[in-house]
C-alpha cells in the first residue's frame, strides 16, 4: 500500500534558494535511511509556507525512516530551515495527492505558451478525454496533461516537470496503464502519428503515437511488412519497447525490438538525443525491452521485410471440445517449423455485430494460425487441427500481410477489463487438464479470453545488437482478461488469479512485459523477477545514469541503483 507523508513547515522567504539547493543533496545523504522512498517533492503553499511531500512504497518503509528516538531525517532537516508545523502520513489517495501536488493555473498557462499541443488541468474541459485509456478501468488522473504534437512539446513538458520534481507518465493508446499518474505530468503522444517509409533501405520511421494499422498500411504500399502484433490499434512504439511479439513473423524473425535501428529519445533533463547501437550501446540495449523507464521515445526506425502475403486465420470449435482441442494443440506445436506461429484461446464471446454470426455470444476454443509457407504446405501442417471436427467458423486462407491482425481478431474499441499474465516453461498433459478444469464448460469461468501463445524459434535467439527483452528461452506466454467495470472487478480478479495460480507449477518467474497489468509486479522484487535478476540489475545501472531521480516511474518501475 503506497503511503504519503506530508510535512508542512514555515520558513523565511529569503531562504528559498537554500532550501532548493540542499533538499536533493539531503535526500542523497540519507539514502540508506530512506529505502522505499518513491518520490520527494516540495510544494509552495504561500509566500512563507511549504509542504514536503514524501511518497513511500509501503507503510513499513515509512515506519523504518522514523527511527525510534529521533526525528525522521527529512523532518530533522526541515527543522533546520524553518518551523515544522505538522507531519502527517497515511494511505496515498487521489484526493491527498491532488491536493498536495496540484499545478497552479498560472504555471500551466506558462507551459502552454511553449507547447504547440493542448495543456489540461483536472477541471478543464477535455481533460478526461485526453487522459482516457483503451482500458476504461484504468483511469488516469495526472496533475497536468500535455497533448504533445512534436518532440519539442515533449522536451518542454519534461523540463517543466523536472523543475518541479514531478514524475512523468507517457501514454499513446493506453493499452497498458500501470498507475493512475496521480500528481504526475502526463504526456499523451497520440497526435504524433507520422510514418515514413524508405523502401530502398526497408526502414520505417515511426512516431510515438502511430498505431499498428498506420504502419501496416504505409509499408504495404511498397510490398513490405513490419514485425507487428495482434492488435491493429496498439501503439507501435510502446509495443516495440516492451519487446513486441508478432503472431506471424516472430518465430522466424524474433521480437519487434530486435529490429529497431535507431531511436529518438528525450531524457529526464529534457534533452533530445539519437540512440543507436554505436552511439549509446547501454541505453540502446535498455530501451528495447525496458519499456518506458528511461525517458520518452519520440520515434523509432525499424526494419521492414519483403512479405506481402501469408496463409492463416482462425478455427473456432465449440467450447465443449476444449479438452480435445487443447491436448491436440499442445502435442502439435513442438514439431512446427519456424514459419508457422500459433496460439489457442478459450473464449466467451460477446453478442457483438462485428463478429461472425456463429460466434456471437458463443463459448468457443479459438485456434490461431499464421504461416509464411504456401497454402498447400500450410494445410498439410494444420491437418491435425482440422481433424478435430467441423469448426463453427473458419477464416483460414491466403491474406494480404496488412490483414495480419485478423488472425487473433482482438477487440478494437476501448472497453473496461481486468487482465493477468504468466509464462510457462512447459505445457504437459497435467497443465492442460488444469486449464480445462478452470476455463472449460463446467468451470463457471466468466473470463472473455484465456490464451496461450507458442513462442520458440527466433524468439529465443539474441539479435545482432542484444536487448533487454525478458522472455528468450520461454516456450509459452499465457494471458487472460475479463470484461466488466469496477462492480465486477472482484469477480474478474479472483478468476484471473485462480487461472494463473492454477498453472503456477509450470510457470516461470519471468514475464512478457507488454502483457503485464497494473495489478502485477507492484513491488521492486516482483519487477526484478519479471525481468530476471541479472537483466534487472543491468537495467537499474542504466537507469542510474539516465534517470537518477526516477522521474519515469509510472510503470513497472526499474529503480535506479
Image (cartoon, rainbow, N blue to C red):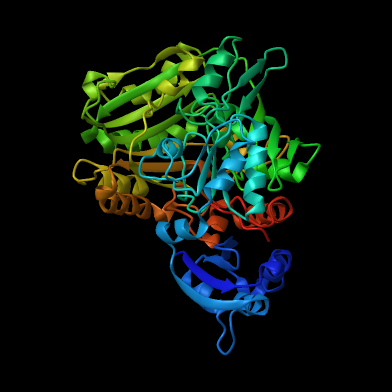
Seen as rendered, the residue at the extreme bottom is 69
Residue 185 placement (x, y as % from top left): 55, 47
Residue 556 placement (x, y as % from top left): 53, 51
**Is residue 106 shown left or right of residue 283?**
left
**Is residue 286 shown left or right of residue 243?**
right
Residue 296 placement (x, y as % from top left): 63, 40
Seen as rendered, the residue at the extreme right is 278
Residue 361 placement (x, y as % from top left): 21, 29
* Quadrant, the C terminus: bottom right
Name the residue rendered at 67%, 39% in the picture: 155
Name the residue rendered at 58%, 18% in the picture: 225
Can see residue 118? Answer: yes
Q: Nearer the viewer, residue 434 or 108?
A: 108
Quadrant position of residue 16: bottom right
Q: Nearer the viewer, residue 102 or 174?
A: 102
Can see residue 40? Answer: no
Quadrant position of residue 66: bottom right
In this rendering, the answer to whether 332 lies above or below 492 is: above
In this rendering, the answer to whether 52 lies above or below 484 is: below
* Quadrant, the N terminus: bottom left
**Is residue 186 shown left or right of residue 312?**
right
Amino acid at each position: 500500500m503506497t503511503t504519503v507523508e506530508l510535512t508542512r513547515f514555515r520558513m523565511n522567504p529569503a531562504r528559498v534558494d537554500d532550501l532548493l539547493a540542499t533538499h536533493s543533496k539531503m535526500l542523497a545523504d540519507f539514502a540508506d535511511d530512506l529505502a522505499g522512498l518513491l518520490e520527494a517533492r516540495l510544494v509552495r503553499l504561500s509566500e512563507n509556507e511549504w509542504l514536503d511531500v514524501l511518497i513511500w512504497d509501503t507503510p513499513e518503509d515509512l515506519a523504518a525512516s522514523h527511527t525510534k528516538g529521533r526525528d525522521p531525517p527529512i523532518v530533522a532537516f526541515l527543522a533546520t530551515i524553518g518551523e515544522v508545523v505538522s507531519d502527517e502520513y497515511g494511505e496515498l489517495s487521489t484526493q491527498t495527492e491532488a491536493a498536495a501536488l496540484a499545478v497552479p493555473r498560472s504555471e500551466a498557462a506558462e507551459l502552454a505558451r511553449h507547447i504547440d499541443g493542448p495543456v489540461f488541468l483536472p477541471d478543464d474541459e477535455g481533460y478526461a478525454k485526453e487522459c482516457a485509456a483503451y482500458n476504461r478501468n484504468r483511469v488516469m488522473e495526472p496533475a497536468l496533461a500535455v497533448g504533445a504534437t512534436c518532440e519539442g512539446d515533449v522536451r518542454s513538458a519534461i523540463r517543466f516537470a523536472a523543475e518541479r520534481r514531478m514524475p512523468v507518465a507517457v501514454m499513446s493508446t493506453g493499452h497498458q496503464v500501470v498507475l493512475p499518474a496521480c500528481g504526475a505530468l502526463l504526456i499523451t503522444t497520440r497526435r504524433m502519428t507520422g510514418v515514413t517509409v524508405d523502401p530502398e533501405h526497408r526502414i520505417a520511421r515511426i512516431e510515438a503515437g502511430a498505431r499498428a494499422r498506420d504502419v501496416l498500411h504505409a509499408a504495404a504500399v511498397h510490398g513490405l511488412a513490419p514485425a507487428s502484433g495482434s492488435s491493429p490499434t496498439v501503439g507501435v512504439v510502446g509495443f516495440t519497447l516492451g519487446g513486441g511479439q508478432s503472431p506471424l513473423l516472430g518465430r522466424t524473425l524474433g521480437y519487434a525490438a530486435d529490429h529497431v535501428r535507431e531511436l529518438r529519445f528525450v531524457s529526464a533533463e529534457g534533452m533530445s538525443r539519437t540512440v543507436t547501437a554505436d552511439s549509446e550501446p547501454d541505453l540502446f540495449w535498455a530501451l528495447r525491452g525496458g519499456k518506458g523507464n528511461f525517458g520518452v521515445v519520440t520515434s523509432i526506425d525499424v526494419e521492414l521485410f519483403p512479405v506481402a502475403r501469408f496463409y492463416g486465420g482462425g478455427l473456432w470449435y465449440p467450447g465443449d471440445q476444449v479438452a480435445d482441442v487443447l491436448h491436440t494443440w499442445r502435442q502439435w506445436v513442438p514439431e512446427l517449423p519456424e514459419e508457422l506461429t500459433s496460439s489457442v484461446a478459450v473464449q466467451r464471446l460477446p453478442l457483438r455485430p462485428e463478429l461472425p454470426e456463429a460466434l456471437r455470444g458463443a463459448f468457443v476454443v479459438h485456434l490461431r494460425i499464421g504461416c509464411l509457407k504456401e497454402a498447400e504446405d500450410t494445410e498439410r501442417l494444420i491437418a491435425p487441427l482440422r481433424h478435430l471436427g467441423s469448426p463453427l467458423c473458419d477464416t483460414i486462407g491466403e491474406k494480404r500481410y496488412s490483414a495480419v491482425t485478423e488472425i487473433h481478431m482482438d477487440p478494437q474499441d476501448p472497453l473496461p477489463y481486468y487482465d493477468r499474465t504468466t509464462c510457462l516453461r512447459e505445457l504437459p498433459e497435467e497443465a492442460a487438464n488444469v486449464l480445462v478444469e478452470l476455463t472449460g464448460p463446467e468451470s463457471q469461468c466468466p473470463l472473455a479470453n484465456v490464451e496461450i501463445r507458442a513462442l520458440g524459434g527466433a524468439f529465443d535467439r539474441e539479435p545482432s545488437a542484444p536487448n533487454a527483452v525478458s522472455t528468450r528461452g520461454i516456450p509459452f506466454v499465457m494471458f487472460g482478461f475479463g470484461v466488466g467495470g469496477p462492480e465486477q472487478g472482484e469477480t474478474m480478479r479472483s478468476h484471473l488469479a485462480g487461472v494463473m495460480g492454477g498453472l503456477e507449477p509450470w510457470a516461470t518467474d519471468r514475464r512478457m512485459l507488454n502483457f503485464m497489468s497494473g495489478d502485477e509486479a507492484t513491488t521492486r522484487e516482483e519487477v526484478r523477477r519479471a525481468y530476471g535478476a541479472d537483466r534487472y540489475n543491468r537495467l537499474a545501472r542504466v537507469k542510474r545514469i539516465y534517470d537518477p531521480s526516477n522521474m519515469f516511474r509510472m510503470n513497472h518501475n526499474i529503480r535506479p541503483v
